[in-house]
Structure formats: structure tokens, C-alpha cells
Amino acid sequence: MQVARYYCPKGHTTFSLLPDCLASRLSSTLAEVEQVVVAAEAAPSLEQAAVQLRPDIETQGGVRWVRRRLGPVRIALLALATLLPEALGGAGVPTLTALGVTLGPELPALVRLRELAGAQLRSLPPPLGLGPRTEPRRSHRHAFQHEAGPDPPGGRR
């Protein structure tokens, strides 16, 4: 599904209206992300969850794929458990499986959480929230690398 983007000439920026069902910064819906997280919570290990969910790719790639969904959702759940303890049952950091029972089966739990956290969506991480992109990791391997070529004149011998 393509999401229309609009340009604001006054603010010199683009914006879009993301439907409630879509995950931000992922090419899937919140229901699909929820299925991955619930399967990872139920599996004995992340590797087994990756093999079960993504049999079409190798295990290492499947684990990365699951982690890209599981990690940000766990961070968002921790933030929401801190911000809205009464709405989430007040029992510490909940699992998505437990939230599905608490919030009811009408909507996927992540869609319902997005509704509950309306004012905090800009500070929650994707795929649940609409937080900013993270800075890319910089490689420290080349930070102190000297230029290729001969030694400069007058160097130590």
C-alpha cells in the first residue's frame, strides 16, 4: 500500500497521513508485526521463532528480521507501561500476549495501543510510534586510519 506524501512549501518539509493499520518505518501492518512479536514471545528461542516465521531465508537473516520487529515493540511497551500504567494493568512491563488479553480481541493490541498513546506517538519508536529515524551507526574501524601511500618525509626511521 502506498501512502501519499505532501509537501508543505512554508515549512519546507513533507508529511503524510499514516493509516492506523500500518506500521511506521516497516513495510507491513501492525497486525503482522504483532503476530511476529507474539510468536517470538511464545517460542523457546529467537532462532526457533525465526525458523518458524521465515523458513524462506537462512536462520541468521530470520533472526535479524524478528529482532527488527521485537526490539522496538518491547521498547514501546516499556515506555507505555511507564506513561500509562493504569491503562495497561499496572503490573510492570507487559508482554504483547498479555496485552492482547487485557485490551480485548476487537482490534490488534498494537492498533489499540496506538489509540491509547495518541499524545505520545511522536516520542515512541517505530513501528508503533512515529518517532524520528535513528542516526545510522558509524563505523569506528576507519576512525584512526591513516592515508594510503608512502610515509611522509622526515618520519622516524
Image: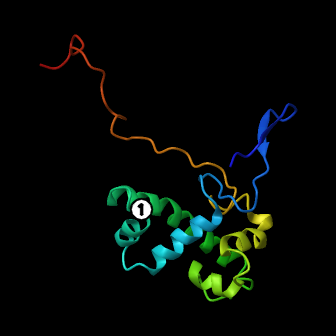
**Left of 147 or right of it: where is 103?**
right
Instruction: Judge whether 73 appears above or below 145 on screen.
Output: below
Asked which quadrant contains residue 108, the reply is bottom right
x 71%, y 84%: residue? 104
Measuring from the top left, give residue 2's x and y in whole percent: 70, 45
Q: How many marks?
A: 1
* Amino acid type at image mark 1: Arg
| SS state under label 1 | loop
| Figure coloring | rainbow
Instruction: Using the rendered view, name the quadrant where residue 100 is placed.
Output: bottom right
Can you identify the residue that label 1 sits on?
54
Q: Residue at x 73, y 78 (%)?
A: 84
- Is residue 36 toward the left or the right of residue 51 in the image? right
Q: Residue at x 74, y 80 (%)?
A: 106
Q: Is residue 10 left or right of residue 15?
A: right
Q: Position of residue 120 (x, y in %)?
A: 75, 65
Camera-nearest residue between 148 and 61: 61
Foreground of the two, 59 or 140? 59
In the depicted structure, whether residue 98 falls above or below residue 46: below
Quarter of the image where the C terminus is located = top left
Residue 16 is situated, as x and y percent measured from the top left of the image, at 78, 46
Q: Position of residue 99 (x, y in %)?
A: 64, 82
Question: 86 and 37: which one is in front?
Answer: 37
Q: Residues within 10 Å of mark 1 (few under 14, many from 20)?
A: some
Q: Is 40 displayed left or right of 74 in the figure? A: left
**Residue found at the very far top of the displayed protein:** 153
Residue lying furthest right in this view?
A: 10
Residue occupying the far front of the picture? 56
The residue drawn where x is 39% and y is 70% is 46
